[in-house]
Image: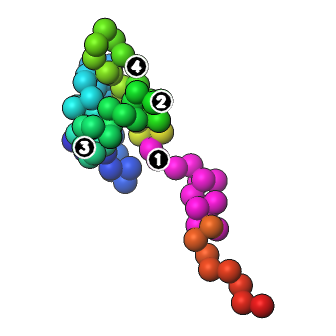
């Protein structure tokens, strides 16, 4: 199931929470494999290598990709047009 922050999630067990491989991680966050692999390699996405395979958890990806209320307010503040003088 692709990532959607507006839907509830029932991933409470390790077996259903862990994603194995950059392909599975990319599919979950609805991105292409190459940029996902790069993001994992550079530390832009939460994950670690187990042997030669990238792994991450749905929980960690949701936390990382869902902005906090404070971050959302900062983004909204930056988008507001400047006041006319």
What's the magenta bit mostly, secondary-structure-wise?
helix
Q: Which dot marks residue 66? A: 1
**Label 4: which residue?**
48
Question: Residue lying furthest top in this view?
Answer: 51
Of mark 2 and mark 4, the one earlier in the sequence is 2
* Image quadrant containing the C terminus: bottom right
* Image quadrant containing the N terminus: top left
Q: Label 2: how many residues lie within 10 Å, few (<14), some (14-19) or many (20+)?
A: few
**Label 3: which residue?**
32
Q: Position of residue 45 (x, y in %)?
A: 43, 34
Instruction: Check whether the beta carbons of the residues at disc 3 and disc 1 lie within 8 A of each other.
Output: no
Label 2 – label 1 distance at C-alpha: 17 Å
Q: Residue at x 64, y 68 (%)?
A: 77
Q: In this view of the protein, which residue sits in the foreground, 2 or 27?
A: 27
Q: Residue at x 41, y 40 (%)?
A: 62
Q: Which dot marks residue 43? A: 2
């Amino acid at each position: 199931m692709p990532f959607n922050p507006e839907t509830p999630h029932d991933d409470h067990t390790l077996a259903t929470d862990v994603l194995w491989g950059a392909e599975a991680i990319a599919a979950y966050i609805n991105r292409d494999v190459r940029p996902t692999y790069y993001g994992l390699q550079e530390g832009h996405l939460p994950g670690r290598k187990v042997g030669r395979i990238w792994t991450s958890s749905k929980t960690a990806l949701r936390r990382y990709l869902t902005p906090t209320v404070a971050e959302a307010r900062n983004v909204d503040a930056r988008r507001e047009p400047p006041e006319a003088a």
